[in-house]
Image (cartoon, rainbow, N blue to C red):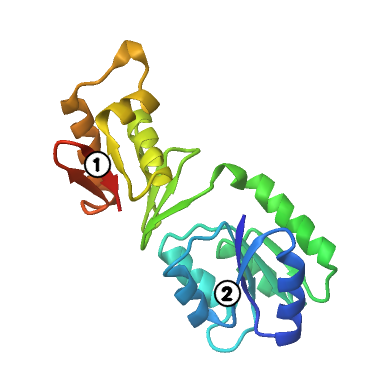
Amino acid sequence: MKILLMEDDAVLSDILLDYLSESWDVDYAYNSEEVYKKLDSAKYDLFIFDINVAGKNGLELLAELREFNDTTPTIFITAYTDTAYLKKAFELGAHDYIKKPFELEELNARILNTKKLFNIDNKTQIFISEGIFYLPDLRQVNKNSNIFSLGQKDGEMLFYFLKNQKRVITNDELIQNIWDFDHIPSDATIRSHIRTLREMIGKDKIQTVRGVGYTYE
């Protein structure tokens, strides 16, 4: 599970990074500007945001992300004791909330609960290009936070290309690895699947090698 942590307390952030990195893949952002920089190149399964950070606070940041249809589960950590902040956090789409000071084991328990609640194990995402990811377990393409489902063969072909990047793959190899002997497709059928994938992930990702097959770049 990939986590993005936003915390501007240098001491606490070091403690959290050391602890969380033992179990999870964790990136760190000091403020909201750093969060957006991280989101330009990566997709996360969970946000952990402090509310009271320099510049745009965690609540304002989540409000913006939700406006952009980013539904990433979010846990807030804060020193505020006022329940108004708790109410606001949930109104904006937060999924959990933990007050400072807290035990590291409590935070980890909340992460595990979120992981189970959102079935994150089945949402492994493979980076394709900026803003585009593939979820092989669900056969879905996440394109700029919009989800598109692929047919079975389209999904299997895309996953095969992703596992075999930068080498030429022939039609025969695709047939042997994706179809069974009772349903061998024609070359036209394979070309149709390739067109569908190009429309979904970009025309330049799957290149035709004339007379041989295809290569994923």
Three-letter residue code for mark 2: Leu
The earlier-in-sequence mark between 1 and 2 is 2
Q: Residue at x 77, y 63 (%)?
A: 107
Q: 1 left or right of 162?
A: right
State how many labels appear. Answer: 2
Q: Name the residue tied to disc 2.
A: 59
Q: 118 left or right of 156?
A: right
Under tag 2, what secondary structure?
Answer: helix
Residue 79 in sight: no
Q: Name the residue tied to disc 1.
A: 214
Within 10 Å of disc 2 (Cα), the crowding (few <14, some 14-19, many 20+) is many
Distance CA(mark 1)–CA(mark 2): 46 Å
Q: Residue at x 46, y 60 (%)?
A: 70
Examine the rendered structure and indicate whether residue 152 appears above or below residue 8.
Answer: above
Q: Residue at x 66, y 46 (%)?
A: 117
Tell me the quadrant of the picture where the N terminus can be found. bottom right
Q: Position of residue 25 (x, y in %)?
A: 63, 61
Q: Position of residue 74 (x, y in %)?
A: 61, 62
Q: Quadrant of residue 192?
A: top left
Examine the rendered structure and indicate whether residue 133 appears above or below residue 37.
Answer: above
Within 10 Å of disc 1 (Cα), the crowding (few <14, some 14-19, many 20+) is many
Three-letter residue code for mark 1: Tyr
